[in-house]
Amino acid sequence: MTQAPDITAKSWLMIATLGLVWGATFMVIELSLRGITPFWLATARISFAALLTLTIWRIMGGRIWLGEGSAWGALAVTGVLSTALPFMLLSWGQQYVTSGFAGVSMAAVVLMVLPLAHVFVPGERMTQRRVLGFLIGFAGVVVLIGGQAFDTTGAKLEGWGRLACLSAACCYATSSVMMRKLPAIDPYALAALQLSIGTCVVLPAALIVEGPPPLPSSETLFYLALLGLVPTAAANLLRVLVIRSAGPVFMGLTNYQVPLWSVILGAVFLHEPLPQSLLLAMILILGGMGLSQYGALKRLFFAGR
């Protein structure tokens, strides 16, 4: 039986780390795409991360038991929805939509998780305070991104591109809830198996859509290794740990942080201008996060008093 979410100080530290890591990932992806195509970029990220996590898992013993065959089926579906399918949908969709729309789509993940978790996950009830907090946080993301979130590119396939981005968000939301309900399993095993399943899907897809892989330069190989190591392998393990302990709704808070960190890091390292709405957006995002998790914060700060 799935236990109620256990949100601790460690949980908050993990989602803060994930927000920072995934916020910085956009810069590395932009650099990587100078030397490799989108589907092969996704393949390189996932396969490198799968190899790394499988190696760590084997060193630690490499044992897994899921019981009934249906659990293995759920694991396979979760692996596809967590990595391969959303990576491919976003890679394809972002050719036809603005980056702002893609950012809002990812921020909408938590709004999709809310009703799913309410129905399927014990302890993840939709309260008025929680819903209001997440709506305020989402508004902060929209304020941060600005009008470009709803600008049109004029591309013939823009409608399908937007559907692809929203479908990727739905994949992340569904996989988070499914992952929470999987039987007890070592997190290293879960991360390794999900990435391995993702590799088995994205590799043939890249061959079919983009043909043989290009020969990347040493610089591109460095960026691919970095993407595979940090935002894919290490971050995927953190994601597993957060969902399995604190729950999918709490994990969704990461999606509000990603665009915030992306803007801040872009200004620091790429000398991009900071939007005038940054302060207001930060207040809304952090305020919404705090309101949605008021009960967890109250227990964290006032426990034992």
Image (cartoon, rainbow, N blue to C red):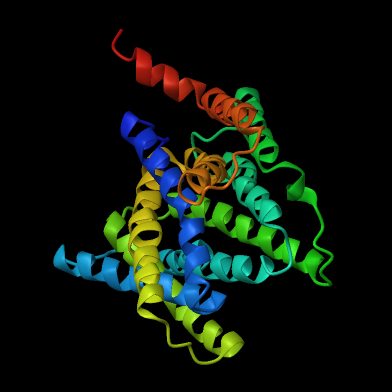
The picture places residue 216, in percent across and down from the top left corner, at 42, 82
Report the quarter where the N terminus lies.
top left
Residue toward you, 216 or 81: 216
Report the quarter where the C terminus lies.
top left
The picture places residue 6, in percent across and down from the top left corner, at 37, 33
Residue 68 visible in the current orientation: no
Q: Residue at x 35, y 64 (%)?
A: 226
**The quadrant where residue 46 appears:** bottom left
* Residue farthest to the front, as pictured: 271
Q: Is residue 129 left or right of residue 9?
A: right
Q: Residue at x 57, y 30 (%)?
A: 282
Q: Residue at x 74, y 61 (%)?
A: 162
Q: Residue at x 61, y 51 (%)?
A: 106
The picture places residue 133, in percent across and down from the top left corner, at 61, 27
**The quadrant where residue 167 appears:** bottom right
The picture places residue 239, in percent across and down from the top left corner, at 40, 50
